[in-house]
């Protein structure tokens, strides 16, 4: 994995039109942004380019845009939030065509240090098509607006979309620079190097619901880490693969042989693979998810046939916490149980607390684990919380991410 990429510090942006792909895919309720974390995360790169005297052209997707362009998924609220945070006007081009005449006119009128925000890139439809035909025309139109390109959208870096990866081809053709922003650089430094070049002992913790989602991650991390901890719903498939009763717990029957292979592989490589030793069980999944629920704690090897495992138990919490005590690098992806429920959040809280108390470099791999750290109040105790769910997983699998790969090497 080539990780030595040009960053915003490696080229002179003064007087140049710089297209920045951000991740402004923020949650909205009735047109109001309910969590502005992603906007805040983009500010260091934007402010650096403004200070350098660049003409800063921002673009991003928002939502899935299943029903075609619509005001509910317009980036208008993002433009307003950006104006407040940057303390300067942001010229929002509301045209659904994204790169049409309105965008061209707005860019032509820019002075050094000005900021333009283009409309939701997914309004063009071609944004999400497969790499071979990833909206070449759209990518070229985006490049036509700019001299250089900066990718700062790690959450989209695993997709070879027009505004993420394809645009770089046309920037290169015109002699421009393709760089990564500060947010992308941080992800590369922490996640990339944790997997490629970890300070040892290196402990990886995987949770979440399904083994299928993490097949390649388990395989790749077993080769890289010293200890692999498996919790969450996926642990029950491993327990069943060992021949234990798991009751009504979540299971991926098609992956039983795979789990056996992975346990065998750990043994062969001399790696420690830790599974839960006790489990919080209940009659059924809570409905609604945060409903009051009564649980018992049982040995993981003896889950009653009529019960469902929903979190790791106290002995496992201790076992997992012990495993990270002397670690130097810890990567965590996926909660230990149904963390949205106060009774079933105890396992996830225990792991988060253990990470908060260790001296190790602690990296949270996006998605639900990031949400859990934020909700449970541990976010500021972690070395790095990734901004990308799917992108983090693919990084941990050892895959090359199109959005990273497309940037120029130093």
Image (cartoon, rainbow, N blue to C red):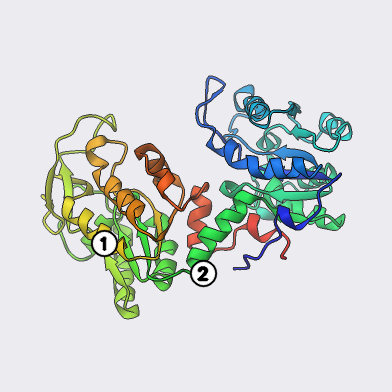
Q: Tell me which residue sits at (19%, 45%) in the image.
A: 308
Local crowd size for mark 1, using a 10 Å CA cut-off: few (<14), some (14–19), many (≥20) = many
Would residue 224 appear left or right of 138 to someone viewing this image? left
Would residue 195 appear left or right of 67 to someone viewing this image? left
Q: Tell me which residue sits at (71%, 44%) in the image.
A: 48
Q: Where is 253 relative to 92, above or below? A: below
Question: What numbered label is drawn on residue 53?
Answer: none
| Label 1 vs label 2, nearer the camera | 2
Q: Which residue is mark 2?
A: 196
Tags 1 and 2 in contact by the CB under 8 Å rule?
Answer: no
Quarter of the figure that contains the C terminus: bottom right
Q: Which residue is mark 1?
A: 238
**Residue 101 coordinates in the image, percent (x, y):** 85, 31
The image quadrant of residue 20 is top right
Quarter of the figure that contains the N terminus: bottom right
Indicate which disc, 1 or 2, sits on the residue closer to the N terminus: 2
């Amino acid at each position: 994995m080539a990780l030595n990429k040009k960053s915003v510090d490696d080229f002179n942006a003064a007087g140049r039109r710089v297209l920045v792909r951000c991740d402004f895919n923020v949650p909205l309720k009735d047109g109001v942004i309910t969590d502005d974390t992603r906007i805040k995360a983009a500010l260091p790169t934007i402010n650096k380019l403004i200070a350098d005297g660049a003409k800063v052209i921002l673009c991003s997707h928002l939502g899935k845009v299943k029903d075609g362009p619509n005001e509910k998924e317009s980036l208008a609220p993002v433009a307003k939030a950006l104006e407040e945070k940057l303390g300067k006007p942001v010229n929002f081009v509301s045209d659904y065509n994204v790169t049409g005449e309105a965008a061209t006119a707005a860019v032509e009128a820019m002075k050094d240090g000005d900021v333009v925000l283009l409309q939701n890139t997914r309004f063009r439809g071609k944004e999400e098509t497969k790499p071979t035909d990833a909206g070449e025309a759209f990518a070229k139109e985006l490049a036509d607006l700019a001299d250089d390109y900066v990718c700062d959208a790690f959450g989209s870096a695993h997709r070879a979309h027009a505004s993420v990866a394809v645009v770089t081809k046309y920037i290169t053709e015109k002699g421009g620079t393709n760089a990564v922003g500060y947010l992308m650089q941080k992800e590369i430094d922490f996640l990339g190097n944790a997997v490629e070049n970890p300070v040892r002992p290196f402990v990886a913790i995987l949770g979440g619901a399904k083994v299928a989602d993490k097949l390649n991650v388990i395989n790749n991390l077993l080769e890289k880490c010293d200890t692999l901890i498996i919790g969450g719903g996926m642990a029950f498939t491993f327990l069943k693969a060992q021949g234990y009763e798991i009751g009504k717990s979540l299971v991926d029957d098609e992956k039983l042989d795979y789990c056996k292979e992975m346990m065998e592989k750990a043994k062969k490589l001399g790696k420690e693979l830790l599974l839960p030793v006790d489990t919080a069980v209940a009659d059924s999944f809570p409905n609604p998810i945060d409903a009051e629920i009564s649980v018992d704690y049982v040995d993981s090897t003896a889950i009653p046939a009529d019960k469902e495992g929903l979190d790791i138990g106290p002995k496992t919490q201790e076992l997992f916490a012990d495993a990270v005590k002397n670690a130097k690098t810890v990567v965590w992806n996926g909660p230990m149980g149904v963390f949205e429920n106060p009774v079933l959040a105890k396992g996830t809280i225990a792991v988060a607390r253990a990470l908060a108390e260790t001296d190790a470099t602690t990296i949270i791999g996006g998605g639900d684990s990031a949400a859990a750290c934020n909700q449970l109040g541990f976010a500021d105790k972690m070395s790095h919380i990734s901004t990308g769910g799917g992108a983090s997983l693919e990084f941990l699998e050892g895959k090359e991410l199109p959005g990273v790969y497309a940037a120029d090497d130093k």
